[in-house]
């Protein structure tokens, strides 16, 4: 019988330092969004990447610093997703994008376990961790800048009410989204669903002057 060549395990590709750091951030985002900061385990993050737990700390120093880096990454990700959705799904219409964001149930879906909204809601309560509190502030301000630019673009297109301060409108939107957990705790059940829909419609009317997408200037 012919002899078989000895089989060897495939060689594992060694990640560059930048790729390893990005992989850890990707895994940490998923773990923290799913379980929260306090319950999220760096050992699980390491296991998802396929490295030892000390490698996580070698790259980020501490669990709090890792979470802060995740928040900085989330700001980039959410901003990019908003810009992409504006162009690919909304035809460049800011009013259409607002209709999508404020649609019934959408804010609820933004906060389900495993979502970026759930991660941000968790971060808002971690004020005892200075690196996280600072990163949350940076993240929120960057999201406010993204929304300010979107609303200003909508004003130029005649879709957003002309007398609105875009920055104030951006912070109103962020405040509405961020207070979702508060409303859910204070008013559970069907009453909250009705309230959420009413607040979303109130916000849309305030920002657009009541006009629906495609009716600007009519």
Image (cartoon, helix red, strand yellow):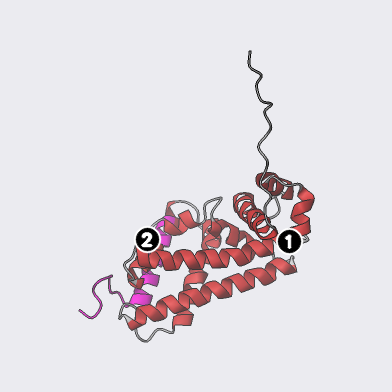
Residue farthest front in this picture? 2
Lower position in the chain sequence, tag 2 or tag 1: 1
Q: In the image, what residue occupies the spot 72% across and 68% down? A: 131
Q: Residue at x 23, y 74 (%)?
A: 215
Whether pointer 2 and pointer 1 mark residues with C-beta atoms closer than 8 Å, the reply is no
Q: CA distance from mark 2 to mark 1?
A: 34 Å
Residue at point 44%, 84% (across, down): 165
Name the image quarter holding the N terminus: top right
Give the number of the disc on residue 20: none
Q: Secondary structure at mark 1?
A: helix
Please tell me how crowded label 2 is: few (under 14), some (14-19), or many (20+) other residues with Cα within 10 Å.
some
The percent position of residue 82, horizontal first and vertical second, equals: 44, 66
Q: Is residue 180 left or right of residue 193?
A: right
Judge left or right: residue 59 versus residue 184. Answer: right
Q: Is residue 202 magenta?
A: yes
- Quarter of the image for residue 6 reads top right
User: Is residue 44 visible from the viewing direction of this image?
Assistant: yes
58 magenta-colored: no
State the image coordinates of residue 90 (x, y, percent, origin top left).
33, 65
Instruction: Work out whether residue 59 or residue 75 is closer to the camera in this orientation and state it.
Output: 59
Rendered image: mark on residue 64:
1
For this view, does 84 lie left or right of residue 46?
Answer: left
Q: Which region of the structure is painted magenta?
A: 193-218
Figure quadrant of residue 19 = bottom right
Secondary structure predominantly adopted by residues drawn in magenta: helix
Tag 2, which secondary structure?
A: loop
Establish if 112 lies above or below 202.
Answer: above
The disc at residue 103 is 2
Quadrant in which the C terminus is drawn: bottom left
Q: Position of residue 40 (x, y in %)?
A: 69, 50
| Quadrant in the rendering for residue 50 | top right
């Amino acid at each position: 019988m012919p002899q078989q060549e000895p089989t060897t395990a495939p060689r594992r590709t060694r990640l560059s330092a930048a790729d390893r750091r990005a992989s850890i951030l990707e895994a940490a985002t998923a773990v923290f969004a799913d379980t929260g900061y306090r319950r999220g385990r760096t050992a699980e993050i390491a296991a998802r990447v396929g490295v030892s737990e000390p490698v996580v700390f070698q790259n980020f120093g501490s669990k709090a610093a890792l979470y802060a880096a995740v928040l900085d990454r989330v700001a980039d990700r959410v901003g990019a997703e908003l810009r992409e959705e504006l162009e690919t799904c909304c035809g460049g219409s800011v009013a259409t994008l607002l209709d999508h964001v404020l649609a019934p149930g959408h804010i609820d879906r933004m906060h389900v376990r495993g979502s970026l909204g759930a991660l941000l809601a968790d971060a808002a309560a971690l004020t005892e961790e200075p690196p996280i509190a600072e990163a949350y502030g940076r993240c929120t301000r960057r999201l406010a800048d993204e929304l300010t630019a979107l609303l200003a673009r909508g004003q130029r297109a005649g879709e957003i009410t002309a007398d609105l301060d875009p920055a104030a409108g951006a912070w109103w939107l962020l405040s509405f989204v961020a207070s979702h957990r508060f409303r859910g705790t204070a008013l559970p059940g069907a009453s909250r669903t009705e309230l959420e829909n009413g607040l979303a419609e109130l916000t849309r009317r305030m920002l657009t002057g009541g006009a629906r997408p495609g009716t600007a200037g009519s």
